[in-house]
Image: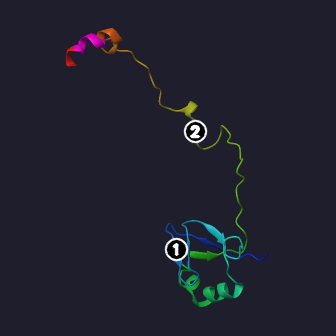
Amino acid sequence: MKDFWITNISNMNVGLSDLNITIKAYSSINLLDNKHYNFTLEELKISLEKGSLYKKRKYIRLRKNEPKMLKANTPLLSETYLPSRERSIINTKQEKYDELLVSDEDFANDNADLI
């Protein structure tokens, strides 16, 4: 199977009018993937020479190699750059205030005349 990988390097979605597709921001796709697209190599070469791939060359780049995909089950280590909740720099303190400690009976008696 041949590959024709392109990458959108901009932060906005880019439409390719002659191919009738939109490439999402910062994404890579294989236009010769039979599962998703139905393009011929000739169509893609024409678009690359004088079509929308040529006009949008500022935003869309042709890739020579397939992008490496990350594995889905990559374990997270505790030394990663994202801190876990256990290592938060904010300490929460549970305080009890006497004026907020009200029993259910006292609350019911105080609000009985409202009904």
Q: Residue at x 51, y 70 (%)?
A: 13
Q: Is residue 100 above or below residue 40?
A: above
The total of numbered circles placed on residues is 2
User: Callout 2: few (<14), some (14-19), or many (20+) C-alpha neighbours within 10 Å?
Assistant: few
| Residue 44 percent coordinates (x, y) | 66, 84
Residue 18 inside the magenta-drawn segment: no
Circle 2: residue type: Pro
| Residue 35 percent coordinates (x, y) | 71, 70
Report which quarter residue 66 is drawn in: bottom right
Q: Residue at x 72, y 62 (%)?
A: 68
Mark 2 in CB contact with mark 1 (< 8 angstroms): no
Q: In whole angstroms, how far apart are the C-alphas of marks 2 and 1?
A: 35 Å
Circle 1: residue type: Val
Left or right for 91, reference 78: left
Q: Which residue is drawn at 57% across and 85% down?
A: 54
Outermost residue, left side: 113
Q: Name the residue that disc number 2 marks.
A: 83
Residue segment shown in magenta:
107-112
Left or right for 3, reference 107: right
Q: Is residue 101 above or below residue 63?
A: above
Q: Is mark 2 on a helix, strand or loop?
A: loop
